[in-house]
Amino acid sequence: MTKKLQLGASVSLIALILLCLAWETVLAPLKPGGSMLMLKTVPLLIPLLGILHGKRYTYQWASLFILFYFTEGVVRAWSDVGLSAKLALIEVVLSVVFFTCAIFYAKQTRAK
């Protein structure tokens, strides 16, 4: 079960990184040609290695950290229109998947 949770967290984090980059550079940037909001991807790179290597502590703090992306997705899904709103909904789904996998992974790998 922990391998499936690790895979779910890894895939959703990588998908969120790719989504944020594509969203703010080519799909629906705030300004034509891309915007500096693509830098919101950089913090997602910080926990990536720990998540891929199954480090429990990384799963613990990243599960809280990902809530910023959940919040941004909810706000932009509510306030944006068109493709940007749809991308924001995908961001919400990916952040919820990551959060769920991360908290259950941390729970299952704790010392008993």
Image (cartoon, grey):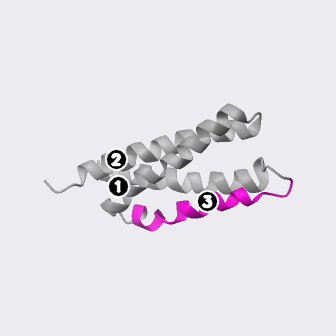
**13 left or right of 51?**
right
Give, as a single range, the part of the protein colored magenta: 32-51
Mark positioned earlier in the residue sequence (1 or 3): 3
Provide the secondary structure element on which disc 2 rests: helix
Reading the image, the residue beneath label 2 is 103
Reading the image, the residue beneath label 3 is 41
Mark positioned earlier in the residue sequence (3 or 2): 3
Provide the secondary structure element on which disc 1 rests: helix
- Residue 36, image x and y in percent? 74, 60
**75 left or right of 53?**
right
Residue located 70% across and 54% down the image: 22
**109 left or right of 42?**
left
Q: Which mark is residue 29?
A: none
Mark 2 Cα-neighbour bin, 10 Å: few <14, some 14–19, many ≥20: some
Mark 1 Cα-neighbour bin, 10 Å: few <14, some 14–19, many ≥20: some
Which three-letter amino acid code belongs to the residue tagged 2? Answer: Ile
Could you tell me if residue 14 is visible in this image?
A: yes
Could you tell me if residue 89 is visible in this image?
A: no
Q: Disc 1 and disc 2: Cα gap in Å? A: 7 Å
Residue located 77% across and 34% down the image: 82
Q: Disc 3 and disc 2: Cα gap in Å? A: 22 Å
- Residue 58, image x and y in percent? 37, 61
- Residue 49, image x and y in percent? 44, 67
